[in-house]
Amino acid sequence: MIFKQVFDKKSSTYTYIIASSEGREALIIDPVLDNVEDYIKILNQLNLKLVKVIDTHIHADHVTGAGKLRDKTKCVTIMGEHTPTDAVELKVKDDEIIKLDKLNFRAIYTPGHTSDSFCFLMDKYLFSGDTLLINGTGRTDFQNGNSIDAYNSIFNRLLKLPEDTLLYPAHDYKGETVSTIGKEKRSNPRLQVRNVDEYIEIMNNLNLKKPEKIDYNVSSNLKLGV
């Protein structure tokens, strides 16, 4: 397997390039529009063919590069079935398998941060979007976010995975690159709650500013950034 983690400084977004070392087919998760040429350069350097692009949800803090990658490489765009956009070519259901040569990615529906949020599990690699972050969790105060849904997605789906599962989120703001499910169970401050009510209390008192250009970003992402 070939694995590349690419960081966008402006939006603190992690994009993931995963490929089969045998068939040289590649998949990209959560691409940023401004970095599309960089992704293509990496693909060319490694002699890879991009066949699929996944967005974990409709992002609010950056414009996706999915549409531009589709236009440049003829790859298939993929999102979860609850996405509000009709521009995506393939909508996957909960527990559906996305194949990339011999690699299998399992779609996991994890609403809460947004109503369309999905995570994707490949072997022991969990690409968690904004649902579960390193030492944090995705906010739930816009885009049909819901703290009860987020609690259920995190505690009843993601934290049920083996503790050595590697956690790769869509964002990090402190320079962290990877964690594990076990580490987050033990040290993530938002997970040290006894019940859903305590989690709701935490999320209701974050008092975070909305992302800059949220309206522009969301409307652009409904068109896959094109």
Image (cartoon, rainbow, N blue to C red):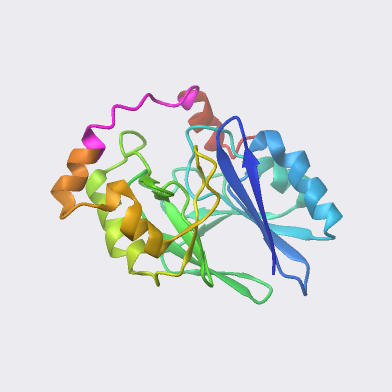
Q: Is residue 60 left or right of residue 184?
A: right
Spot occupied by residue 4 in the image (x, y as percentages of width and height) = 68, 55
The residue at 30%/34% (across/down) is 141
Spot occupied by residue 202 in the image (x, y as percentages of width and height) = 22, 39
In this orientation, does residue 205 appear?
Answer: yes
Q: Is residue 110 magenta?
A: no
Spot occupied by residue 92 in the image (x, y as percentages of width and height) = 49, 61
Magenta segment, prevailing SS (helix, strand or loop): loop
The residue at 58%/47% (across/down) is 30
In this orientation, does residue 111 appear?
Answer: no
The residue at 23%/32% (across/down) is 205
Q: Is residue 212 magenta?
A: yes
Spot occupied by residue 192 in the image (x, y as percentages of width and height) = 24, 52
Where does the magenta region start and end? 203-214
Quadrant, the N terminus: bottom right
The answer to which of 184 and 110 lies nearer the viewer is 184
- Where on the picture, by quarter, is residue 64? top right
Would you place residue 66 above or below residue 107 in this image? above
